[in-house]
Image (cartoon, rainbow, N blue to C red):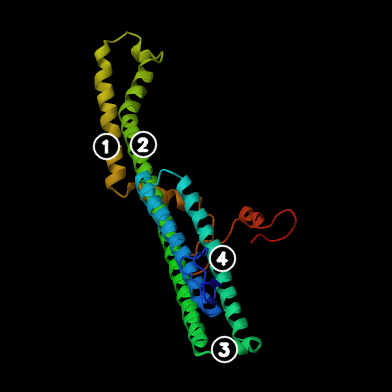
Amino acid sequence: MIKCQDRTIEKPLKSRIFFTTSDYAQIPLRATELFTPLAQQLRQDWASTFQAAESRLSAKRTELLKANGSNPRLVQDLLGDTQLWDILERSCNRQIAELKAFQNAYESKSWAVLHEDEKVVEDLNTFDKSIRNLEREYVNGLKTLSDTSRDLIQLEFNLASIAEAQKSRSTNLSMKRLSWITFVFLPLMFIASLFGMNVDVLASNPAWWIYVPFAIGTMLLTLVVWLCFKYSDLEDKIERGFSHLTRRQLQPNLESGQRRSMSPRERTAMFPASGKKRS
């Protein structure tokens, strides 16, 4: 109320300062004007969350490439991030469900008196579009995070496999070097052991250089045997021969077309002490 000298003028009070937790809210003329800012505020908060999550995954990718598959802790971190995305998905779905439930409750017949204004209907339509856009952004953001985490986990497994393959290759090279060292020194050790035995051939104490031709001859013999096994089918023939000798099965008689007769010992071996026939 404002008082003047000759009359009193009454004017309604207007708010000049107000507080809100939403960046989009303002003093509304209708209650439905607060619905869309609510969805916009949620959209902004979740956009910040998705951006922080993407930054974390980007940092994990850099750390993963630097580690080159040698840090097993990264796999645990990535699996933990995947579980976190599942929690975010449940939270997003719960918020969308609550927004839709609120919208359905407001549009019910209990509040039909509030829907007579065309602007209220327009606000409700805008709110419905905001919910659908928010849900679509939720789905896209969570899908991006899940796909990125899955790709990083696969990349970590690939790098770890490559690192293990490199270690195996290094081990194979070491074993190859050790085999060549053994290939050279084993004949020499054999001749040295032979010359160290108390045999009649060495009773006259021959000169030391006698060891050299024997050692060279033994090494050449070993080399020839190795070449025969490497570049011929001698090894396969020996294996087939031993397999043929140790194989115990009925052989067909090629001349008569019948199975060869079994010896009494073979027939006895087919029946154990219990009396049941062996399969």
Q: Is mark 1 on a helix, strand or loop?
A: helix
Label 2: how many residues lie within 10 Å, few (<14), some (14-19) or many (20+)?
Answer: few
The residue carrying mark 4 is: 91
Residue mark closest to the camera, 3 vs 2: 3
166 or 109: nearer the eye?
109
Residue furthest right in the image:
274
Q: In which quarter of the image is the C terminus?
A: bottom right
The residue carrying mark 3 is: 115
Q: Is mark 2 on a helix, strand or loop?
A: helix
* Spatial separation of the CA atoms under disc 2 and disc 1: 22 Å
* Spatial separation of the CA atoms under disc 3 and disc 1: 102 Å
Whichever of callouts 4 and 1 sits on the residue coming sooner in the sequence is: 4
* Spatial separation of the CA atoms under disc 4 and disc 2: 56 Å
Q: What element carries label 4?
A: helix
Residue mark closest to the camera, 2 vs 1: 2
For residue 224, which numbered disc appears in the image?
1
For residue 17, which numbered disc appears in the image?
none
Question: What's the residue type where badge 1 is placed?
Answer: Val
The residue carrying mark 2 is: 175
- Residue 210 visible? The answer is yes
* Spatial separation of the CA atoms under disc 3 and disc 2: 84 Å
Q: Is mark 3 on a helix, strand or loop?
A: helix
Question: What's the residue type where badge 2 is placed?
Answer: Met
| Relative side of 146 to 272, left or right | left
Instruction: Look at the picture and state if 104 lies above or below 177.
Output: below
Residue 93 location in percent, x, y? 55, 71
